Amino acid sequence: MELKFQEYIYQLLNKAHYEYDASVKAWVGWIKNMPGVYAQGKNIEKVRSELISALEDYLIVDLKRGRKIPGFSVSPRQYAKAR
């Protein structure tokens, strides 16, 4: 199950948008259609690392709430049993 979770996160990371924001003097990154999945850092690598953390939190909360996650193959019940 863990590998599927990681694969899903990396698929989402491929959809991330990055840009330099001069107003905060940092790189920022976000994933469309995923409210709250946003990160900023001194370089893209740091932003990517922070996005991974934000995605993990976002997905775990959705799983715990029993929400269906489009494109994710593990049901919330299977996730709960694996924990």
Image (spheres, rainbow, N blue to C red):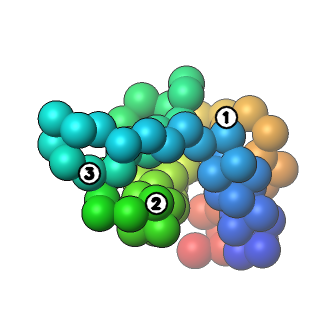
Circle number at residue 83? none
User: At x 74% / y 33%, what residue is drawn?
Assistant: 70
Mark 1 nearby-residue class (10 Å; few <14, some 14–19, many ≥20): some
Residue under label 1: 68
* Residue bearing mark 3: 26
Question: Considering only vertical position in the picture, is 52 above or below 66?
Answer: below
Which one is in front, 52 or 18? 18
Please tell me how crowded label 2 is: few (under 14), some (14-19), or many (20+) other residues with Cα within 10 Å. Answer: some
- Residue 76 is situated, as x and y percent measured from the top left of the image, at 66, 50
Calculate the distance from the C-alpha at mark 2 to the C-alpha at mark 3: 9 Å
Q: Residue furthest front?
A: 22
Residue type of the residue flagged with mark 1: Lys
Horizontal and vertical percent for residue 3? Answer: 78, 74
Q: Quadrant of residue 74?
A: bottom right
Report, in whole angstroms, how far the alpha carbon at label 3 lies from the one at label 1.
Answer: 34 Å
Looking at the image, residue 12 sits to the left or right of residue 19; the answer is right
Q: Secondary structure at mark 3?
A: strand
Query: Contact (CB < 8 A) between labels 3 and 1?
Result: no
Mark 2–mark 1 distance (CA, rounded to whole Å): 30 Å
Q: Which residue is mark 2?
A: 44
Q: Residues within 10 Å of mark 3 (few under 14, many from 20)?
A: some
Q: Position of residue 48 (x, y in %)?
A: 49, 61
Is label 2 or label 1 in front?
Answer: 2
Q: Is residue 3 left or right of residue 58?
A: right
Residue drawn at point x = 16 percent, y = 35 percent: 23
Count the labels in the image: 3
Callout in the foreground (3, 1): 3
Q: Mark 2 belongs to which amino acid?
A: Ile
**Residue in front for this viewpoint, 77 or 31:** 31
